[in-house]
Amino acid sequence: MAASAATSGARSTRRLTKRQQQKLVRGVLYVVFVLALAGLVLLADWETTRRNFFNAELARTMFPEVLTIAARNTILYTFLAFSFGLAFGLLLALMRLSSITPYRWLATIYIEIFRGLPALLTIFLVGIGIPIAFGTRWPTLVTITLGLGIVAAAYMAETIRAGIEGVPKGQMEAARSLGMSYTRAMVSIIIPQGFRIIIPPLTNELVLLIKDTSLLFVIGTTPATKELLKFGRDLLNINANATPLIVVGAVYLMITVPLTQLVRVLERRNARSR
Amino acid sequence: MTTGGSDGQVPAIEVRDLHKSFGELEVLKGFDFHVNEGEVVCVVGPSGSGKSTLLRCVNRLEEPNSGQILIEGDDITDIDADVDALRSRIGMVFQSFNLFPHLSVLRNLTIAQRRVRHRSKGEAREVARQNLERVGLLDKIDASPSHLSGGQQQRVAIARALSMDPDMMLFDEPTSALDPELVGEVLAVMRDLAEEGMTMMVVTHEMGFAQEVGDRVVFMDDGAVVEEGPPEQVLSDPQHERTRRFLKMVR
């Protein structure tokens, strides 16, 4: 009984060629998509949505501050944290690769801790920890650089280590055989090649950092130090309207999308040069 | 500090009772060996016989377990030895070329001159030009290594080593990674070097080169010297069964 059903089923599908089957599946998918879209269009309250999310007048009042203050701060914080993370990450990566065991341990422990903790928690700890530990408030920019940079360094250390380890062993041997010291060989030969390998993943880290600046609100901000998301959220609360979130969202994308496109280009170029 | 030289001179390279193990595997079992100044010594033997390890111990790319290695009388295995300075007196050519791919041919030749020898930019450039001329690749001075054939890359690697004005050159199977038609150009450069009187230690499978250019051939197997002597003796009239068996296989 079951066997005969199976064979008759097989016979009926066999009547369609493979191409016809594919066409059928694709047609069904299109219909489902159009129905879903139509449902969304018919069911949503477009007038309310427009008023609450796309209020042109409210959006206009956000300029130029959304660019001159909020976007500027987001970019500045990203730059500071990235620079700190890169320098400290390089140091950690070299410690991870060091022949001195305690260095390796220290770097490993650091990396495991700060990759394992939520970034928000670290930023929060830095924000409240420094005033308690040192008895004074440090300049906001320093706190921000540390808060974001400490986490970024942990991630970048692993990326940089992978880059350095990706340089063939013969490169170090060739450099040493010419009489270069280990440090000189690292600086002139190994690290430049390692960085070439990791430019795409490092750019990805940069994009992640841009988005992580939105966590900085926990440190506390003044009107002049707001980054994009805090700027948008404050306006959301004042106006009881979500348009500011749409505007800052668009600004984020204006910064991040070109970068992710850049990563794609760089990855393609790297793949070709190998 | 003077022993081993055939005419009482200090040998360029002298290896005394060298032991080297990788974990459980003992690769060199109390090795004695020397190369005199101006001499071309070819080290031949089956793969796994320890010849590359021996060569790499000479400039301490491999760390020997025990024994002594004297470079012109200076002990490179001494704990206080300035290994970097000693290495800069020894040119090394690798099987896989190991040119620096992120630098142009010129920069490949000048970077160690500038950073290690502290030569001026102009002087380093001049030395680089002379050595590229020597290997017949002056026209590639601004090329990127990735645009060169394997044979050209190896010749640049030789010019790079020569730019440090080494007292001796080590060659670690310099033609083994090359397509057969490119072997000749590299051997020709090495032959010129030998004729100019360079002290050379060459690990190779090129029996023709060893026969023609070598002053002495060392046949080693299983971490020790089986026999050594002038090429016509070792390669044409080997005394040991193991040498005969090996030569029959490679010929």
Image (cartoon, helix red, strand yellow):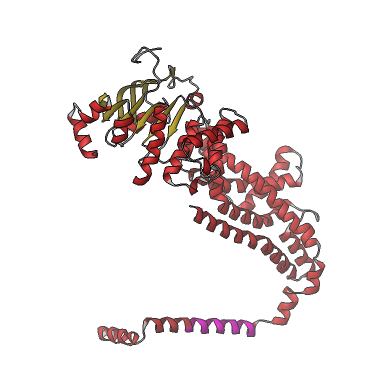
| B159 in magenta | no
Residue A80 visible to the viewer: yes
Can you name the residue that lies furthest to the left here?
A: B241
Quadrant in the picture for the C terminus of chain B? top left
Q: Which of A121 and A76 is in front in this view?
A: A76
| A29 in magenta | yes
Quadrant in the picture for the N terminus of chain B? top left
Give coordinates of residue B78: x percent, y percent. 44, 19
Which stretch appears magenta? Answer: A27-42
Give the main secondary structure, helix, strand or loop, of the magenta stretch: helix
Q: Which of B58 and A204 is in front in this view?
A: B58
Give coordinates of residue B150: x percent, y percent. 42, 45
Quadrant position of residue B232: top left
Give coordinates of residue B37: x percent, y percent. 40, 20
Residue A106 visible to the viewer: no
Q: Nearer the viewer, residue A62 or A234?
A: A62
Residue drawn at x 19%, y 32% as measured from the top left: B244
Residue drawn at x 31%, y 31% as measured from the top left: B212
Residue drawn at x 27%, y 24% as measured from the top left: B230
User: Does A111 sit left or right of A147 as displayed?
Assistant: left
Quadrant position of residue B57: top left
Q: Which of A172 and B66 is in front in this view?
A: A172
User: Does A211 sit left or right of B205 as displayed?
Assistant: right
Query: How many marks on residues?
Result: 0
User: Does A101 sit left or right of A140 as displayed?
Assistant: left
Q: In this view, does B118 lie above or below A33?
A: above
Give coordinates of residue B88: x percent, y percent. 50, 27
